[in-house]
Image: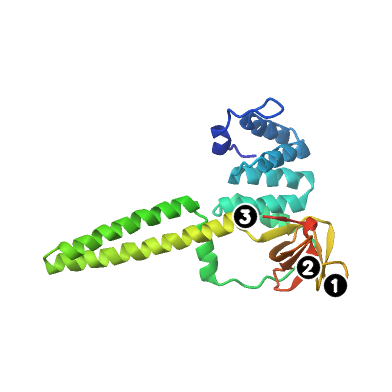
Amino acid sequence: MRRILFIQMILVAGLVSLAGQTPEERYSQAGVLYGSGDYSGAAAIYRQLFEEGFRSGDLFYNTGNAFFKSGDNASAILFYERAKLLSPADEDIDYNLQIARSRITDRLETVPQLFFVRWFDFLSLLASTNFWAVGAIVLFLLSLMLAVLFLTRARARGRLLSFWLSLATLLLSMLLISLAVRNNSLVNHNSRAVIMCSIVTGRSAPGETGNELFVLHSGTTVTVEQELGDFREVRLPDGNKGWIRADCMEKI
């Protein structure tokens, strides 16, 4: 199990838990439990840290590993998916996620996603929302400065160069704003969820009286389309839709 620089927990190491341990100490304890083969104990501590609000690609990766080793494949997939959002270029996460997915029951064909959309999503996750937003503001201000130079320079050559540089930085600023918006949507408003129940029936309407459309098993990833009471309309990877119980899934 790889060594982790868990920055978020170090920053709040002064906070003391009910058990008298700092988050950093509990994180280290979970690593010790994992190393000794107590995967369920490690997963419980990692999960508690997540529920207390700690977020890190490494935390999610280790949580997924602990759940996978303890036999909870659905929870492993859930946390690997969360880890992938924060560390999209991490090959270890991708590999472990594929291994976990290979063990689920459902084999659904995935509707192909446009290359540009996949590329843009991947790019947006390479940095945080704040990073993209600050970069966009800096470039926008630079664009304004170049625009002023364009308006004040007397020489035609200098004016032309200022114009094109101003336009380029403005367009790049707009791109970074788009990346910030997409990153925020994927990380903070993710509509995907993982089926946690061993088996659940998808129906044509919310409730138990709708026609049965499909059956899903734990570990399958779906997209939540609508919410109504205790039921959620979900879209499957193959594009089919149906209503299932909300308590049988957990948002990524």
Q: Quadrant of residue 133?
A: bottom left
**Nearer-N-terminus badge (2/1):** 1
Of residue 190 and residue 231, the one placed in the foreground of this image is 231
Q: Quadrant of residue 199?
A: bottom right
| Label 3 secondary element | helix
Marks 3/2: CA–CA distance: 29 Å
Report the residue marked by disc 3: 94
Name the residue furthest right. Answer: 209
Q: Are marks 3 and 2 in contact (CB under 8 Å)?
A: no
**Nearer-N-terminus badge (3/1):** 3
Quadrant occupied by the N terminus: top right
Query: Taking 31 as reference, is 172 above or below it?
Result: below
Of residue 104 and residue 78, the one placed in the foreground of this image is 78
* Identity of the residue drawn at 50% across and 60% down: 181
Q: Is residue 71 visible?
A: yes
Q: Which mark is residue 210?
A: 1
Residue type of the residue flagged with mark 1: Gly
**Badge 3 local density, few (<14 within 10 Å), some, or many (20+)?**
some
**Nearer-N-terminus badge (3/2):** 3
Residue 240: x and y in percent read: 73, 73
Name the residue furthest left. Answer: 154
| Label 1 secondary element | loop
Report the residue marked by disc 2: 243
Q: Are marks 2 and 1 in contact (CB under 8 Å)?
A: yes
Residue 63: x and y in percent read: 68, 44
